Image: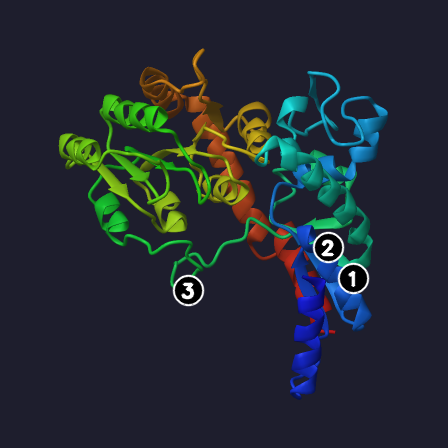
């Protein structure tokens, strides 16, 4: 990739295009920082996930020193640790780099994490999609990384946002017809895959709640799913449940009808839920999603975790019971409201994220 980027920059200059002054890049693309420096291009790094995840990555030497992991990133002791007060507790089996795919690939991912940490010094400014009130412990550890979130397109949803799949625009009209705070919204992001047994258990759990639900089922979500079974399920829940292949999640979570969010706890989904004051039911799939669940259930207390049974399956009764518990919990509702207000203050004029974003814009204007 570095060679391709070098050629792109050189070709742009050869074609007489204005010379690039800045590169803004994801921190996991640290190799691009080195290319930029070769061309005298200044660098801003962007971290799109939880600041706590970055803090844990940057503290790898301490984790090794403390004997929690070895020099390949593998857990040495099965225990829950907390990097600093206010940060989410995390079990050593749930570190991001050890939950990102096939086991044989984990050392490669860990090496990437360690090498990217060293390249962070090439950036003049580092910003992230978070806000101070959400992660005070992590930002205290690394005050030079500035929160500019929660990031979103615009309050009125008039500006186009990049879509992973074509959105089903019927969602919002369907939500308009539902009572306030009644709908269970279910979405697992762009990568989670369910096996057939878990898919059917989830479907039957949603049916069991007796509540209206909006469920995002990507075309590649479950292999081997019987079309006849899905058709029969849709018929049984017709009028109460809506199943779509993709939706405008920012619009859905901002809708008055949504009661709770059954989520994989990806960071974008987490920030969108927080910003819109929606309680969570946490169902993480991989990577940093376990860390995000810990924020929601242990630190912010804005949602509940769904617990698998002895077979590793989240049963339909577990889903039904937790939906009722989270929707009826007044303390969760109050904390969700407080976080919603804090998130909106941060991105409003005079807020910490607003002012950090202005600093970024001013720097890029130099």
State how far apart marks 2 and 1 are (Cα): 7 Å
Residue named by callout 1: 34
User: Is 33 placed left or right of 233 in the picture?
Assistant: right
Q: CA distance from mark 3 to mark 1?
A: 33 Å
Instruction: Pick the residue in front: 361 or 315.
Output: 315
- Furthest-right residue in this view: 65
Label 1 packing within 10 angstroms: few (<14), some (14-19), many (20+): some
In the image, residue 141 above or below residue 8: above
Q: Are marks 2 and 1 in contact (CB under 8 Å)?
A: yes
Label 2 close to label 3 by CB (< 8 Å): no
Of the pair 203 and 352, the residue shown nearer to us: 203
Tell me the SS state at disc 1. Answer: helix
Q: Residue furthest front?
A: 104
Number of numbered labels in the structure image: 3
Mark whose residue sits in front, 2 or 3: 2
Q: Is residue 362 visible?
A: no
The kind of secondary structure element at disc 3 is loop
Query: Does label 3 or label 1 sit earlier along the sequence?
Result: 1
Q: SS of the residue at dot 2? A: helix
Quarter holding residue 114 = top right
Distance from disc 2 to disc 3, alpha carbons, whole Å, reads 30 Å
Q: Measured from the top left, where is residue 32 in percent x and y?
A: 71, 61
Q: Earlier in the sequence, mark 2 or mark 3?
A: 2
x then y, percent, for residue 20: 70, 76
Q: Which residue is mark 2?
A: 30
Quarter containing the N terminus: bottom right
In this figure, which residue is indicated by the disc labeled 3?
159
Q: Position of residue 182 (x, y in %)?
A: 28, 33
Residue 307, above or below 9 = above
Q: Assess whether mark 1 and mark 3 are in contact (beta carbons under 8 angstroms).
A: no
């Amino acid at each position: 990739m570095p060679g391709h980027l070098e050629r792109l920059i050189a070709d742009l200059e050869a074609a007489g295009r204005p010379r690039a002054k800045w590169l803004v890049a994801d921190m996991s693309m640290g190799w691009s920082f080195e290319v930029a420096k070769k061309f005298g291009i200044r660098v801003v790094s962007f971290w799109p996930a939880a600041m706590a995840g970055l803090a844990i990555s940057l503290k790898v030497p301490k984790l090794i020193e403390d004997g929690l992991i070895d020099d390949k990133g593998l857990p040495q002791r099965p225990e829950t640790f907390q990097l600093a007060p206010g940060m989410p507790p995390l079990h050593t089996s749930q570190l991001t780099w050890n939950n990102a795919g096939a086991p044989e690939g984990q050392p490669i991912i860990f090496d990437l994490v360690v090498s990217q940490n060293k390249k962070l010094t090439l950036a003049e400014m580092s910003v992230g999609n978070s806000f101070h009130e959400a992660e005070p412990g992590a930002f205290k550890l690394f005050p030079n990384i500035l929160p500019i979130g929660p990031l979103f397109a615009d309050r009125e949803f008039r500006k186009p946002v990049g879509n992973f799949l074509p959105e089903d625009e019927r969602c919002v009209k369907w939500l308009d017809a539902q009572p306030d705070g009644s709908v269970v919204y279910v979405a697992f992001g762009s990568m989670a895959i369910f096996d057939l047994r878990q898919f059917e258990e989830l479907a039957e759990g949603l049916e069991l709640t007796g509540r209206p639900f909006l469920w995002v089922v990507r075309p590649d979500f479950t292999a081997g799913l019987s079309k006849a079974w899905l058709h029969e399920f849709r018929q049984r829940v017709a009028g109460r449940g809506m199943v779509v292949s993709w939706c405008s999640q920012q619009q859905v979570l901002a809708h008055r009808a949504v009661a709770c969010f059954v989520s994989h706890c990806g960071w974008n989904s987490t920030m969108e839920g927080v910003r819109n004051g929606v309680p969570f039911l946490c169902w993480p799939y991989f990577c940093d999603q376990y860390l995000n669940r810990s924020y929601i259930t242990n630190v912010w207390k804005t949602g509940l975790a769904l617990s698998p049974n002895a077979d590793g399956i989240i049963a339909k009764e577990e889903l039904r019971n937790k939906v009722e518990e989270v929707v009826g919990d007044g303390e969760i509702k109050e904390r969700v409201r407080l976080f919603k207000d804090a998130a909106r203050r941060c991105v409003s004029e005079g807020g910490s994220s607003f002012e950090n974003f202005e600093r970024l814009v001013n720097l890029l204007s130099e």
